[in-house]
Amino acid sequence: MSNSNEEIVQVISLFRHGKRYAFENLDTHDFIPSDLCEDGIDTTIAKGKQYVDKYFKAFSESPFNDTDFKCFISDTARTIKTIIYRLSDFVPQVDLKHMKLDDLKEFTQKNIPNSIYDDNIFKSYVYSNDVAYKFFKSDPDFKYLLSEIESEIGNKSKKALELYESYYNQSLNKGLKIQQIFTEEHLIIKEAFEKLNANKRIMDVNFSHKKSLLCCIHQLISRYYEEMKKVKDNAPDKKKIVLFSAHDLYLTCLVQFLEVVDKRKYNYSFDDEINFVIFKKKDKPSNKLYVRFEYNDELMEVPFSSLKNKSECDLDTLLEKIEKEYVCYTFEEIKSLCDRKINDELFPKGVLA
């Protein structure tokens, strides 16, 4: 979405991993939740080619060098595979299906220089996800929706209801293995989860208490700050493109951080991406930098911008917002704040068993 009056100086992008195998494949495939499905791989490659044409080629035909490019990857097979397929224009095409995690890392480090497996960025994931899980399970509206769905499952199959409850009552990240749960009843259970996921209000509730879930995004947005600050200061190690391959939770967090008013319009689907595009305006002073916010190909308006066009803001404004809300805390301070908020505000005595 650049125009002739702009010069892009940096793009920071966070994208969700590609589509995993669907439940319908359970009977004909070895169901590995971390594996990308064939259709999903094709989509990821296509999205990557669009991204390369849109941004990489604005800087260089050969972007993999220390002065141009950096990539952060969370330590799961599907996020690693996603970055490989996304950058298929620059990476040798091999069969990744049966490649183990260590081999995936070795392949990526060999073929995508300056890629960083930094789970420190994402280390709050389980913690914050568990917080969100406990919170929205205690919400009265969610309980009502849950009871309706459980009743509907029970009417279709008692066994399906038992399997569903067995899985659902586990911690989100500690559930039983999918293939042990979704047997011949898996389509009934799949339909139930789709109804829960389709209720966008749950996602809103999940992250409406931003201060209580600061740890969820603290490490990520701190990295954003470091990379954008280098551009502002014209540091010798500044990067032109910074990629983050992660999960839907982090797209949600960025939308929340940007204070986007209509959060329900975003699906956080497979391969969705959020781009922070930092640029100069040719009719403005050369040291003045701006940021544009994109969700896929749509502009996102941010209320904290002082500009008339709310899909843009001064880079200084964005950096000041991050300084005030995030980088002023250490991760341990954030986690401590979350613990206090959980105990004192989210879960008053007696709310949770």
Image (tube, rainbow, N blue to C red):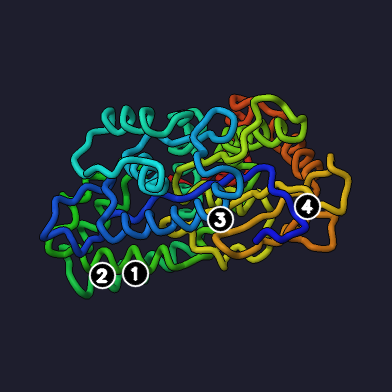
Which kind of residue does numbered mark 2 sit on?
Ile
C-alpha distance separating marks 4 and 3: 21 Å
Point out the tag, 4 or 2, that comes first from the N-terminus.
2
Q: Nearer the viewer, residue 3 or 29?
A: 3
Q: Say which of marks 3 and 2 sits in front.
A: 3
Label 1 sits on residue: 149
The dot on residue 313 is: 4
Label 2 sits on residue: 153
Q: Say which of marks 4 and 1 sits in front.
A: 4
Q: Residues within 10 Å of mark 3 (few under 14, many from 20)?
A: few
Which kind of residue does numbered mark 4 sit on?
Cys
Point out the tag, 4 or 3, that comes first from the N-terminus.
3
Dot 4: what SS? Answer: strand
The residue at 46%/43% (across/down) is: 245
C-alpha distance separating marks 4 and 1: 43 Å
C-alpha distance separating marks 3 and 2: 46 Å
Which kind of residue does numbered mark 1 sit on?
Ile
Q: Are marks 4 and 2 in contact (CB under 8 Å)?
A: no
